Image (spheres, grey):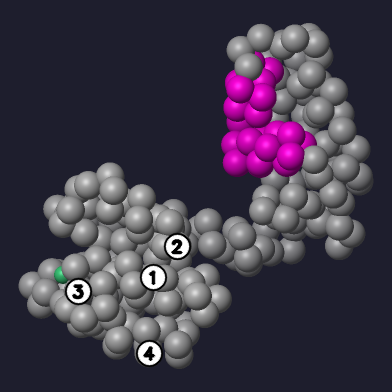
Amino acid sequence: MNVLVVEDEDRVADFLCRGLKGEGWTATRAGDGETALSLLKEGGFDVVLLDIMLPGLSGHEVCTRVRARGDEVPILMLTALDATDEKIVGLRKGADDYLSKPFSFDELIARMEALHRRTRARAGATPGVQAEDPVQFDREALCLKVDGEVVELSTKERDLLALLLGNAGRVMSRERILNAVWGLNEDPMTNTVDVYVGRVRRKLGDHASRITTVRGAGYRYDAQDV
Ligand code: CA
């Protein structure tokens, strides 16, 4: 993973860069916003750790400019301020996540990995088996690609599939599905979940067997055809 660390304080920047390198990652440091912007223009970064309190351009300003030029690089904002307002401003300006100082290095790493995973999933570039998976799911585009064919999904179908996919290999009870997808604790129709699972299965075409009905328990999605 190639990380850009945008931090003006030497002590903090050194700590971050050393820690990231210890994880086997590449860390590049920018001491101010302008430097960060020109480095980002060259591209190639997987995640940006962006401090808010910087000399010159603030972290928020950097974030705004990066997004304004269409750069989707994942940004994790860092700040000494643990104020909700600051977090909201940062997220509105296009930051993907937020961490208040002081933070544990383990948490930082975990969040960066999560961000990286999310971005890769969004780009459909998950390495290994899934790269060749005939079932490609794009949550944001509300669509599924099955054997290269685009299949449209309704929002409920998408939410249902996202839940099952995100918990692949695990049985999801009808109650859990109902709660996560419809925000209900009781089924007004008594078979809403089953009806939607049927629809999603049909949309999976030849890969419908990936959703298994586990009698008396619920449904399970398997990442490979069974
Ligand atoms: Ca700073």
| Closer to us: 141 or 138 | 141
Q: What is the three-letter code of the residue carrying label 2? A: Gly
Instruction: Decide if residue 169 is on the left or right side of residue 27.
Output: right
For the residues bearing labels 3 and 2, Cβ distance under 8 angstroms = no
For the residues bearing labels 2 and 1, Cβ distance under 8 angstroms = yes
188 to 135, vertically: above or below: above
Q: What is the three-letter code of the residue carrying label 1? A: Cys
Q: What is the three-letter code of the residue carrying label 4? A: Ser
Residue interval drawn in magenta: 155-183
Mark 1 or mark 3, earlier in chain: 3
Q: Which residue is mark 2?
A: 94
Please report the residue visible at 91 percent of the width from the left and 45 percent of the height from the top: 205
Label 2's element?
loop
Pinpoint residue 95: horizontal percent, then vertical percent. Answer: 41, 61
Quadrant housing residue 45: bottom left
Q: CA distance from mark 2 to mark 1?
A: 6 Å
Q: Does 218 lie within the magenta span?
A: no
Please report the residue visible at 16 percent of the width from the left and 57 percent of the height from the top: 80
Quarter of the rendering occupied by the C terminus? top right
Neighbourhood count class around disc 2 (C-alpha, 10 Å): few under 14, some 14–19, many 20 upward: many
Inspect this view and state whether residue 91 appears.
yes
Instruction: Decide if residue 210 is on the left or right side of residue 149.
Output: left
Q: What is the three-letter code of the residue carrying label 3? A: Leu
Q: Which residue is mark 3?
A: 54
Pinpoint residue 9: horizontal percent, then vertical percent. Answer: 11, 74
Pinpoint residue 212: horizontal percent, then vertical percent. Answer: 77, 29
| Image quarter for ligand 1 | bottom left
Pinpoint residue 52: horizontal percent, then vertical percent. Answer: 24, 66
Q: Within 8 Å: ligand 1 and the Cβ of disc 3?
A: yes
Q: Which residue is mark 1?
A: 63
Q: How many numbered badges does the structure rendering display?
A: 4
